[in-house]
Image: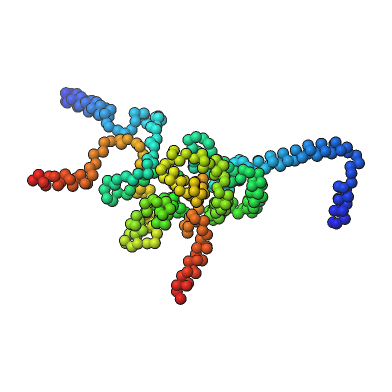
Amino acid sequence: MKRFAIGLACAALLVAAAAAAAQEHIATMRPATPLAENGTPAPMPKPVNSDIRQVRNYPEQPPLIPHTIEGYQIDKNSNKCLSCHSRTAIEVSQAPMVSITHFMNRDNQFLASVTPRRYFCNQCHVPQTDARPLVENDFVDVDEVLEYVKSKEGAK
Amino acid sequence: MLAFLKRLWTTIRRPSVHYSLGFLTLGGFIMGIIFWGGFNTALELTNTEKFCTGCHEMRDNVFAELKTTIHYSNRSGVRATCPDCHVPHEWTDKIARKMQASKEVWGKIFGTINTREKFLEHRLELAQHEWARLKANNSLECRNCHSADSMDITRQSGRASEAHQRFLFTGEKTCIDCHKGIAHRLPDMSQSAWHGEKPEKMLKEATAFLATRQD
């Protein structure tokens, strides 16, 4: 009985030690600063303002915004984006027009203006910053996948 | 009344009996300095942000909104105060604007925008007044700081430099045409308020047009 108790105590100690060791090595995005203290925040990344349209990673991807949108007002009163991207504004602004799908209601009926469900641009469209990715991204474009499949079929 | 005016006129016309010419001219000169200085000091006192935000109408609505914009907080620490944009800097224009502002004193006394709801109701009209003023003076108050000559478009983003070359340098548009709502939130901009058209006018035109079609 006594030996069993000692064994149990040893096992408990081992588990506790292992847990403590594991805790130190858990990969986490949280900086080393303890929770109760304020660490030095990383410098804020700069917004990309190149005006160069970015490739869409898949056809349905909402196009990225290649310019800063700081202070843009999008609410019931006004939509700053549409002051350049609306159907009537693009002649002056030479900006891409808001997609025709944005005039469709959910029954696929075209309305006279942008539907309320597509009105808030930055629900889907986002600008980019020059921040470095936190983890490596091994996304493969579908065109490459198709090439790969074709090459496999050719090899057969 | 007429008799009183006549008496006043004879008093003014009559040469002074007790005071010397030196006293009168020098006294007049000094009093002139004091009155003129006092007037200008009082005028400049009403030309400060502290004065503007002394009333809750301005402090809680437009000034609160300004604080989130680049004209209040930015990297270089240069900022615009209320009169920088809303009062002309030249003296004659300034006096003209100050006389117009008596309407604003009226509004303050009778509480035209003394609640948030009333303010929002009048917001489009108030904004349109300012847009019309800036449009008429070719965005003079913008240009007091932002001069087109000193604008280095090579340091602007491609979009900005292209727009400034196409519209600003050619004189086709003035600052306020594109830069509405940069210092305060915008009112309801539907019905082409962007282009300075009055919704009532557009509605009337559309109704008239539809009426001709129905015949």
Q: Establish if A140 lies above or below B190.
A: above
Instruction: Specify the quadrant of the image occupied by residue A15.
Output: top left
Q: Nearer the viewer, residue A142 or A53?
A: A53
Q: Residue furthest right?
A: B17
Q: Residue furthest bottom?
A: B215
The residue at 11%/47% (across/down) is: A153
Name the residue nearer the viewer: A11 or B188.
B188
Q: Which residue is drawn at 55% across and 55% down?
A: B125
Which picture quadrant has residue A28? top left
A72 to B76, vertically: above or below: below
Taking B16 as reference, is A74 left or right? Answer: left
User: Relative to residue B92, is residue B61 drawn left or right?
Assistant: left
**Camera-nearest residue between B81 and B156:** B156
Q: In which quarter of the image is the N terminus of chain B?
A: bottom right
In the rendering, at what x and y percent does residue A43 appear? 39, 33
Residue at 55% from the left image edge and 51% from the top image edge: B135
Q: What residue is at 87 percent from the left and 55 percent from the top?
A: B3
Residue A17 image offset from top left, x and y in percent = 24, 26
User: Percent from the top left, x then y, of residue B138?
Assistant: 55, 49
Asked whether residue B109 is in view, the answer is no
